[in-house]
Image (cartoon, rainbow, N blue to C red):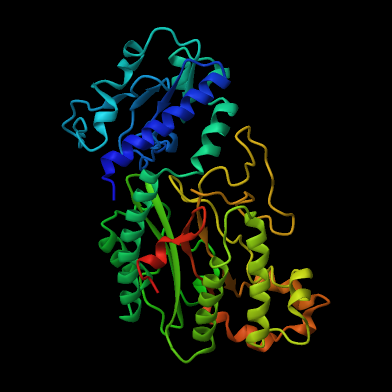
Amino acid sequence: MDSLKTLYQTHIARLQQRAQQVLARNKLDAMLIHSGELLTVFLDDHDYPFKVNPQFKAWVPVTQVPNCWLLIDGVNKPKLWFYSPVDYWHNVEPLPNSFWTDAVEVIGLKNADDIGELLPAQRDNVAYIGPVVSRAAQLGISAANTNPKAVIDFLHYHRSIKTDYELACMREAQKLAVAGHRAAKEAFFSGLSEFDINLAYLTATGHRDVDVPYGNIIALNEHAAVLHYTRLDHQPPAKRHSFLIDAGAEYLGYAADLTRSYAAQKNSLYASMVAAMNAEELALIGTLKAGVRYTDYHLQMHQRIAKLLLTFDLAQGISEEALVAENITGPFMPHGLGHPLGLQVHDVAGFMQDDAGTHLAAPARYPYLRCTRVLEPGMVLTIEPGFYIIESLLAPLREGPFSQYLNWQAIDALKPYGGIRIEDNVVVHANRIENMTRDLHLA
């Protein structure tokens, strides 16, 4: 395999080509990409955890340093002003010297406010890409050239196709996340609380809780029915029924996003349903291929959910087709099949059909689907079907015309288990699908 340095050099060359295209299309001379600034807590003297501008870390793996700047013209070597002040109160990152620094001109920035004096004086045709609009104005960049939509749309659309460097980083993120999931599974079967399971996960991945790409979902029993559950109870429940973990990791700014569900008792209906959902998720992945729209796979998963309802006698006297057509499957899987993945967990451009930003919304029946793209080689996506017992969503079914087809006694018996979700991260290649998660033998 090529070294990370070689892969990065090819990555930068690809980004430079994209930069040339977008600058020419928008009659710009350069892009000034800002890592971001610290945000102070209201009426307090400390800052929120820093999250870097994803368009910044697309170019350089600098993820925890505010007040940095990149000047990109698509021709000359990218120029990085790296913030490294004199400060004895806080940790200061030294000027980087790593596999990537030969491809970038690195300049130390001692005082954040000095950047205006260091940048080229002529900025009429420079676009600011970053989170602090007021800083762009201070630098004399016009409102029209501050995060211009045409530039952002172009960059977002092409970010969907990953370079080999990006895929290498994402595979490393998978390894970290898999180690965490294994530790969390062991902690669950050892009887630990949600809070302590989360600590086991963080220890195994080497992440702090502010470093993970999203708040870890560590859900025991009925908490698994809360799709983004992040409370983390300190005490374990009196009786353990189920465990759902949706937790990721980052490597050089790139994310992994994995989910597994476990039954406390192997011989339960829930355990059988977890095994069946796992099989259906893998079977769906086996049908993925370039050239097919992602929404087709979301619909296919609802057909598979209908199959599960009938297989486990949760629905009776109605066909799979009718269960989907009447959206009876909808309350059981209220979220989308998955989403693009990369520098962000819910990565950008899931609805963009071209680099001009043409938008194709999710189907009205499935408003929470996060991707309507046609699959292309180089895309990375999550596949995360779920099955939940959420009373607020089931209530209309109980009272509706199709209530008679549902086995409410069996459905209610599943309430203490909350739900099931299985999630893998896949790469679309020209003639195959790479399942990064299963390649690391995470069952």
Q: Quadrant of residue 122?
A: top left
- Judge from the rendering whether residue 315 lies leftward or rightward of residue 106; answer left or right: right
- Farthest-out residue, bottom: 267
Residue 318 against residue 390 in the figure, above or below: below
Q: Residue 72: x and y, percent?
A: 40, 23
Identify the residue at horizontal 38%, vertical 47% (top origin): 254
* Residue at the spot 47% in from the left edge and 15% down from the top edge: 29
Towards the viewer: 162 or 259:
162
Residue reaching furthest to the front: 431
Residue 228, can we see it?
yes
Asked if one can make out residue 40 in the rendered structure from this viewpoint, the answer is no
Find residue 185 and report its image quarter.
Answer: bottom left
| Residue 78 horizontal side relative to residue 375, left or right | left
* Relative image position of residue 412 (x, y in whole percent): 63, 84
Q: Quadrant of the C terminus?
A: bottom left
- The residue sitting at the right extreme is 401
The answer to which of 4 and 423 lies nearer the viewer is 4
Q: Residue furthest left?
A: 88
Q: Position of residue 332 (x, y in %)?
A: 64, 72
Q: How many marks?
A: 0
Residue 293 left/right relative to 77 = right
Q: What residue is at 69 percent from the left and 45 percent from the top?
A: 360
The spot of residue 97 in percent (x, y) is 19, 33
